[in-house]
Amino acid sequence: MIKTDILIIGAGPTGLFAVFEAGLLKLKCHLIDALPQPGGQCSEIYPKKPIYDIPGFPEVLAGDLVDNLMEQIKPFSPGFTLGERAETIDKQEDGSFIVTTNKGTKHHAPVVVIAGGLGSFEPRKPPIPTIKNYEDKGVAYIIRDPEVYRDKKVVIAGGGDSALDWSIFLADVAAEVSLVHRRKDFRGALDSVEKVEELSKIGKINLITDAEVVDLKGEDHLDAVLIRHKDKAVGEELKETDHFIPLFGLSPKLGPIANWGLEIEKNAIKVDNAYDYQTNIPGIYAIGDVNTYKGKLKLILCGFHEAAIMCQSAYQRINPDKKYVMKYTTVSGVSGFDGSKKEAKKEVIKSIN
Amino acid sequence: MSDVKITIIDREGEAHTVDAPTDMNMNLMEVIRSYELAPEGTIGICGGMAMCASCQCYMLNYQHMLPEKSYEEEDMLDQAFFVEENSRLSCQIPITSDLDGLEVKIAPTSE
């Protein structure tokens, strides 16, 4: 069991900055994120895009902002559970919470902060009505163990890097690899596109372009996919296969958090913005893009503000008997949990005679 | 201030004719959001960077008058579902005075 003072769900810019504000109050943080790296959307969707509305930064790349935040919070040694999605929350008798991820990792904290942005990034599922019936019965959206496909027939769909890379990889593992894509153009690294072309020429990848998988067949397990060609003269073909792997990128979903009993409005969590961004469940806060209130703006700078306010309230909740006043970093500096200390240089007083 | 009339068919099939300003640097996705014609969190998820496909619309007229698709837009439509010949990412369509009378239909959400 991982124990911490503030458990933050979501390691985007807001969640990361909350670690800093909590650290100033000597509260330790641990973050859970479904993505394998911190930074949320900034790292996953637009790391190379410049942002122009971070106060004090006329221009900063989203990826650099994340790097800077990681550097800023380093003294407070946050813990990370990455690549796992927060699944359930259980309130304990003492008012604290246990949050368990989809992989069973348990986290115990008196305060839970949801900084989940638009939700956790999940694979996008093609709109084939029967696809649910075949999940884990031949259909997978993520390749966890490539050995599953050894000496099997595999159909991959998609035109991006992951579709290309896995087609190349599985060409040496599977009995047969088909790559189905809607267009002739692939948008991946040039190397990968060329490699697929080469493997297609020597018959190691069966490249099917201008086509789409539109239906799935099989009794208990997938045994064929129906491929529709754009060219009406070619029409449809039934292709025998053991596995179908659609790789269409990721999109964010509010996910299991939506079932935690929190008040949801417009796909976001309602919070008290007259005070501390607490949700309808005391001890659970929501900050950043994931929350909503009258006048809400989904801006990184608003998330930072909400993080600071939330931490003051969380401090009082964790230490109900302690008196505290907010201190400026210009006055007190930053004392890390790692023993580091940053502070302004003391002025030297020396008289000149 | 100058407005154009745009007809937007929502995901339930209901048509709404709305006034869209041409002087606010707005795009079609933002017009749809400002009139709340699709629930928050189901449209314009990436904020308008052509990095998701949640604002996909079918252009029912004026297709020849719209700006060419950028590489990024082509890319995203490539990964999107329910894509038709007249599909566009509405965040890539700036509201200009030529678009008076534009008719569009919001594409279904993918799961």
Image (cartoon, rainbow, N blue to C red):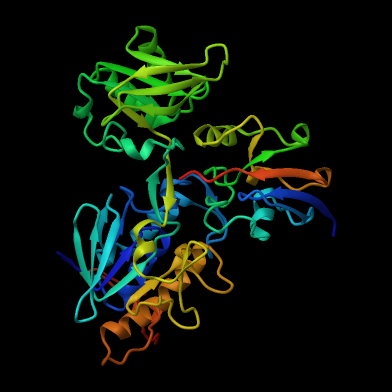
Quadrant of image for the C terminus of chain A: bottom left
| Residue A275 x, y percent position in the rendering | 46, 83
Q: Is residue A237 above or below residue A246?
A: above
Residue at position x 76%, y 37% in the image? B61
Q: Is residue A203 left or right of residue A319?
A: right
Q: Is residue A305 above or below residue A133?
A: below
Along the viewing direction, whichever of A89 and A337 lies nearer the viewer: A89
Q: Is residue A63 above or below residue A302?
A: above
Quadrant in the picture for residue A222 = top left
Along the viewing direction, whichever of B34 and B2 lies nearer the viewer: B34
Along the viewing direction, whichever of B62 and B47 lies nearer the viewer: B62
Viewer can see residue A94 = yes
| Name of the residue lying farthest toward the top | A202
Q: Is residue A267 left or right of residue B35?
A: left
Quadrant of image for the N terminus of chain A: bottom left
| Residue A302 x, y percent position in the rendering | 51, 68
**How many marks overall?**
0
| Residue A216 x, y percent position in the rendering | 38, 28
| Residue A87 x, y percent position in the rendering | 28, 58
| Name of the residue lying farthest toward the front | A219
Q: Is residue B26 above or below residue A349?
A: above
Viewer can see residue A16 = no
Residue at position x 39%, y 33% in the image? A247
Residue at position x 64%, y 60% in the image? B36
